[in-house]
Image: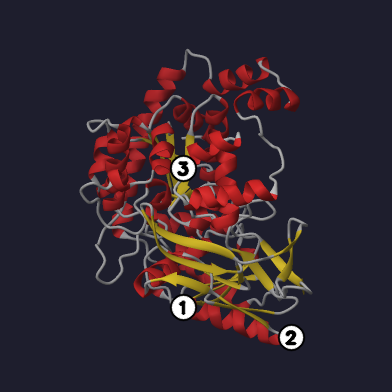
Amino acid sequence: MNQELALEVLLDGNSVFLTGPAGTGKTYVLTQFIKLARSSGLHVAVTATTGLAASHLGGTTIHSWSGIGIGDSIYTGFVDHMSKTRREIIEKTDVLVIDEISMLHDYRLDMIDTVCRLVKAKPDVPFGGIQVVMSGDFFQLPPINRGESRQGGFVVNSQAWEELDPVICYLNQQFRQDDEDLRSILESMRGADLRRGHVEKLLARSEVESPDEDITELYTVNIDVDKVNERKLAQLEGDEYSYMQTETGAKNYVESLQRSILAPSVLKLKQGALVMAIRNSVEKKYVNGSLGIVKDFDYATNFPVVEFRSGKTVTMSPETWELRDGDKKRASISQVPLRLAWAITVHKSQGMTLDAAKMDLSKSFVEGMGYVALSRVRNLENLYLTGINRMALQISSEALRIDEVLRKKSARDKTKFEGEFANRKSKISEIIETAKETPRTWQDKLEKMREQHPNAYKSWSSGDDEDLKMMFRNGSTVGDLSKHFGRHEGSILKRLQKHFGEDTIVL
């Protein structure tokens, strides 16, 4: 299926699974759909299975949005204990987007389905009638099963998937890889038909040295990532600055929160260090995943001053992550929202496009890991391989079986919708034309906004800020605060996130 037809299917209101090989433009289609759906007046919740993937779309994690957090089941009275703000967000949602769905356990999709049905008060309708748009690729990394935690598999095995019966939009046109050799290798891996010639071309890249010292390096395990980053940091001259995280809460909750965030417990930096932002800036100066260089350290606070590749220079001060169970705060961690970025794990690279990369796949330990890593780059010429094992070339047999089913259903859905859409006006055109017919200047929009929210886009006074924090601590909801301060709920939410941390409301 091509991107245009997939977009028409989405705008027609269908619940969809958007899939296809890495580089076929799944994220592009999603961003276009989100933009057009919102312009038509729909409330679109944008989520992903990881914070990094969510940041690419300007959203949050699905665990956070749904309120399930790190839980493995929905207990009796779950929704009754959910915050009013969380319920209101779900109630208003018309469309739910979940990106990188391959990493979500089947039982968690069932949990999200249950929450939506209960909050929407539509227990007999999948997801309470919300249009669900899932995106991902089952050839990439699967859900992680840890120790004594509840075990699970791909979401296609869930009851929610079966009842939703999403339309399959299988994209097949390649936009990332501009190299026929690399494209052939990746397609052969997806078909479990990797030949000797493919392997030889890969191994040939292990004999080529990278000309760039600051090239991104990918590893399969955290210990190797840490070693590279520590070695690179040690090579820099100048003073080393250390930032210890501060934490609150019981040890088990703090450890759980630590596993779910990218912040190191001790952050060590020097001038010249390559770093990555690990949170979205409330002021939109950077996003989770932005790369930059430490240029200096603030004279008064010693906080790092980072020049991001966007050109913006920011003094990075500590942010706070919180683990909440309903209205109860279980744990918090405060740390400067940076980590060293000369090396990252393959897991965290999923969804990225890299101009060039050095990879060590010799410790690949799960099927799909090599495929994810190799598909991050555009061509073989910018791939530098320092190691590889057999597992790196393996693809899940279950993913192969699922893929065959998805391809067949996508072909049927393609034929069906091409027929249905043949004699009607394009939804894309309709939405764009409607937008053109209602031109409004910014001043017009602002005046309209201030009819309902008198203080929209006005500066916050220090007094109002203190009142906001006090009222929030005393239990006022976002809705209450919106009415009191004469500002949109989204503005209140962002201000609270600035004061209390980005995840204060949404976890």
Residue 141 x/y as whole percent: 40, 60
Question: Can residue 175 be seen by looking at this rendering?
Answer: no
Of 152 and 92, the residue lying toward us:
92
Residue at (25, 49) in percent of width and height: 157
Dots 1, 3 in contact, CB < 8 A: no
Residue at (71, 21) in percent of width and height: 440
Find the distance from the CA under tag 2 to the CA under tag 1: 34 Å
Label 3 secondary element? loop
Number of residue marks: 3
Q: Which residue is mark 3?
A: 477
Farthest left residue? 76
User: Considering only order in the chain, which callout, 3 or 2, is on the residue closer to the N terminus?
Assistant: 2
Mark 3, residues whose alpha carbon is within 10 Å: few (<14), some, or many (≥20)?
A: some
Q: Amino acid at mark 1?
A: Ser
Q: Which residue is mark 1?
A: 362
Of 369 and 1, the residue lying toward us:
369
Q: Which residue is mark 2?
A: 239
Residue 491 x/y as whole percent: 60, 41
Which mark is in front, 1 or 3?
A: 3
Residue 96 x/y as whole percent: 42, 38
Q: Amino acid at mark 2?
A: Asp
Mark 2, residues whose alpha carbon is within 10 Å: few (<14), some, or many (≥20)?
A: few
User: Considering only order in the chain, which callout, 1 or 2, is on the residue closer to the N terminus?
Assistant: 2
Mark 1, residues whose alpha carbon is within 10 Å: few (<14), some, or many (≥20)?
A: some
Please state if 242 lies on the left or on the right of 410 as rendered: right
Label 1 secondary element? loop
